[in-house]
Image (tube, helix red, strand yellow):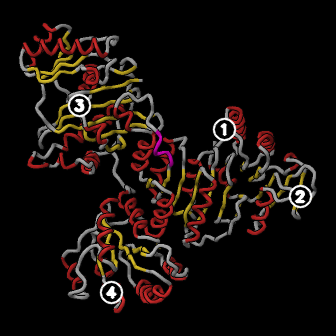
Amino acid sequence: MDRRAPIERLLRPRSVAVVGASATRKALANSVLDNLARAKFAGAVHVVHPKASEIEGRKAVPSLAELPENVDCVVLAIPAAAVLQAVRDCAARKVGGVIVFSAGFAELGEEGRAAQDEIRSIARDANMAVEGPNCLGMMNFVDGIPLTFSATDLVPVTAPGIGIVSQSGAMAVVVRGAFHGRNLAVSYAISTGNEAANGIEDFLEFLLDDASTRVIAMIGEQLRDARRFLELAGRAREIGKPIILLHPGKSVAAREAAKTHTGAMAGDNEVMRAMARGKGVTVVDTLEQLIDVTEFVQRFGFPSGSGLSVIGESGALSAHLLDYCEEQGVPLPSPEGVVAERLAAMAPGFIQPANPLDLTAQAMTNPDIYRQSLDAIGADERVGVAMLAISLTSRAMAERKMPPLIDILRRHERSKPIIFSMVGDDADIGSDYIAELRSLGIPFYRSPERAVRAISVLLAAEPQRDDRALPSPAPDFGVRQGMLSEAESKELLRGAGLPVPEFRIAQTADEGVLAAEALGYPVVIKVHSAHLPHKSDVGGVVLGLADEAALRAGWQRMMDNLARNAPDAPVEGVLVERMARKGVELIVGARNDPQWGPVVLVGLGGVYTELFKDLKLLPATSTKAQVIEALDRLKGAQLLQGYRGSAVCDLEAVAQAVCGLGDFVARYPRVAEVEINPLLVYGAGEGTRALDALVRVE
């Protein structure tokens, strides 16, 4: 089935039919007709009305059956109860696509869902696109076709612009208005609603192929075809068409079915973010960031440097931004070498080379200092973005500062992106200066903090990365379903090349003594039971048993604990293992997410796992270098880097273990979750050791 052709007919129609217009009042369909008239749509416009012969000067036909065949797009602005038959009629007339405004489908319960499923079935059988139901329609600014009931100004597209696709119609309109307000071109604004037949991925694919679209802004509350979305995101990265995604749902709890820390902490939103970022998607947290980040990328692309340089006029603001940028993870590289010398020479004794740079009041008497500052910072390759943070407290102040500054910016040969942040919030400075800045391609922000929040996302984005290939799925490996015991899990992981220590299973204390003598004291004993994945919680772990007497006493203590805390749990024996020497405790894990595929996790382990939740989630395709980079971004990264005289840890071995887990779950899709906690990591070149492991199989 050709998905592309029906979407093309829906979004770029040469003929349109509107159902639901009123001869006596302003209905939603009448607003569509008004929009088409104001846009001077050159194609055929058909109106369907059961009684009126004419609506707003246009001839009407009594039913969809009276339409000519092959109308490209039909807009249904009718009650939900009439939609299903209307969709059938459209299919019979070989309509290319249908836009359904009506609500009252899957969002209201089972009856509505059944009707929505029927729409999907009809559309697929007829190879007909459906936008909605419960949507606001679409705005095609490339061809000037507004098929929406929202009042729309048709802003022509003179250069490749921003394509908007959103499941929420209201959000699509808001974002479109924000971009047009910033003098940015918008190619399409598409609301997908309930997505009965065509999801956000279908419209994303259209925008990827559309020459009039340079950047894509997405709002997706639910990505229904995650694997296809990732394929499309990968293609977007290859062709250099950035996707900026707002995905509400960060607060949704992890799946109840998750039995390991990995499963509980790798919730839906976290997995989505990791996988999308891995394909070059820039994921944002707020509507503000979606607008600000998309504007920046549309104007400049992604920053080439890794830091921000701030040019301001206040020492207090400099101190504040030092704190705020640190909080937001935005580096502020200090001027060095020639750059520092040029800054120091601007006004000796008044301006000190620093970042943020405080121009003091010197710029009021000598505006050329702005130019000198920008020129000097432009030579710093560490800086990806330069920000002007200018105090504007009134129209009079703006009239004094802005004309010379705008003149400098107009003549300045930019070597890196420049953004403008106003210090003064809603102070009245007029709109002319803001419009002039935007006409020069310079984003304007009402506060430095808002600008920093956008820059923090941009500097952390991964528009390009080198993924590694995962192994192909292997035939079923014959392991039972459910949570495996530690011993079963370790044997599986040992076969996959993970660093698992030798152990023995004992049924009695006497067997435990023999096992300990063979392995060497001191030893640890742990209950061997697939029904007790968190053994410590029930007293099922005893550490540091130095000799036979200690082992026998520990054995009895464990049995007493189990009788008291887990009397009904089946026990298959006791695992005996030699005590490992101390190292830094990490957690590494992996899972086969049903929607998104294999992901891996790494972070602080042992007792710190739940306490600090200092974790990084990554696609299983991550390379060892990318895993090490993630380790460096942990809050507790210093523990791995020689904290207070301790040895620098073997990060290469940790990365090898994480990549090995990624390969393991990719090779065996039945593995739902796997976790090693703790994974002990030793000094550089000394490797790692998996002290505990759990595998859950579906």
- Magenta segment includes 104: no
- Tell us which disc is closer to us: 4 or 1: 4
- How far, Cα to Cα, is label 1 from label 2? 31 Å
Which amino acid, by three-letter code, is at mark 2? Ala
Disc 3 target residue: 498
Disc 2 target residue: 23
Q: Position of residue 490 (x, y in %)?
A: 25, 24
Q: Is residue 87 visible?
A: no
Upstream in sequence: badge 3 or badge 2: 2
- How far, Cα to Cα, is label 3 from label 2? 74 Å
Q: Residues within 10 Å of mark 3 (few under 14, many from 20)?
A: many
Residue at 19% in and 49% down: 638
> Which mark, residue 361?
4
Residue at 38% in and 65% down: 452
For this view, does 578 lie left or right of residue 567? left
For this view, does 84 lie left or right of residue 221? right
Residue at 57% in and 61% down: 175
Report the front residue among 603 and 653: 603
- Tell us which disc is closer to us: 3 or 2: 2
Q: Main secondary structure of the magenta part?
A: loop
- How far, Cα to Cα, is label 3 from label 1? 46 Å
**Quadrant assignment, res 351:** bottom left
**Is the residue 146 above or below the residue 407 in the image?**
above
Query: Which residues are the magenta region?
Result: 248-252
